Image: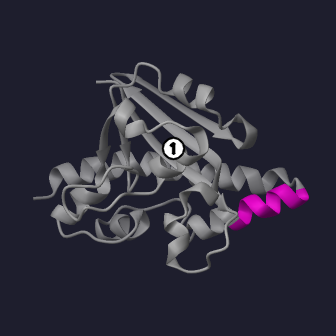
Amino acid sequence: MRTAYLDIETTYVGAFTDSRLFQDFANHKITVAGIRVMDGDNDVFVQLVGGDVTLANLMAALEGVEIVVTYNGRSLPDKVKGYIGFDFPVIAAGLGVVLDKEFKHRDLCPECWKKRLYGGLKRVEQDLGLKRQLPGKDGKWADETWRKYQQNNDRRLLDELLAYNKEDVFMLRSLELALAERP
């Protein structure tokens, strides 16, 4: 089955400074979209950055995909708590496509809840003993790093951000496999 693992990084341009900013989807601008497409022995990773994050480029990267896997990505309420996620609503607000209406979608976050694993992706990875190459970084770090990159045009900052996004995307597959082995 042709499967895509997708994660985005964003920069927030809205006014909220509390938890409401996570629901202010229209004011999150996508800075990086990482997409890993696996199909049998084929494994392709693509990153769209800045102005290259367009509807046409995203749909081209997802061409032929049968299912998209995210962590907390859904734009439709889950069947566990009735919550919506983050990635797909931001993509819908910014690019005008509701991915979980275009593709079959597997959001690993509600699956974690069913197995009594709570928190963000990094927290769940820790609870499962999954190790990162780039520990200590999170979405706030990604936003700050993008802003610094935009100000200084320092390629090292962009490279760090891209490495962080790539690890997020690849950890989705690791999490999926770990969940399959957990009762």
Amino acid residing under circle 1: Ala
Q: How many marks?
A: 1
Q: Main secondary structure of the magenta part?
A: helix
- Whether residue 149 appears in magenta in the rendering, the answer is yes
* Residue 168 location (% of width, % of height): 49, 53
User: Which residue is disc 1 drawn over?
Assistant: 92
Which residues make up the magenta segment?
144-152
* Residue 123 location (% of width, % of height): 38, 71
Q: Residue at x 67, y 73 (%)?
A: 15
Dividing the image into 4 quarters, which one contains the C terminus? bottom left
Q: Residue at x 25, y 53 (%)?
A: 178
Dividing the image into 4 quarters, which one contains the N terminus? top left
* Residue 19 location (% of width, % of height): 50, 77
- Whether residue 33 appears in magenta in the rendering, the answer is no
Say how the picture is coloured: one colour
Q: Looking at the image, which residue sits at the far bottom?
A: 18
Question: Residue 182 appears in which quarter of the rendering?
Answer: bottom left
- Label 1 secondary element: helix
3 vs 41, nearest the viewer: 3
Q: Is residue 143 above or below residue 92?
A: below
Q: Is residue 118 left or right of residue 38?
A: left
Q: Residue at x 64, y 37 (%)?
A: 48
Q: Residue at x 77, y 57 (%)?
A: 157
Q: Looking at the image, which residue sits at the far left?
A: 183
Q: Looking at the image, which residue sits at the far right?
A: 152
* Residue 14 location (% of width, % of height): 67, 67
Q: Is residue 88 left or right of residue 139?
A: left
Q: Is residue 37 left or right of residue 135?
A: left
Mark 1 burial class by Cα count in 10 Å: few <14, some 14-19, many 20+: some
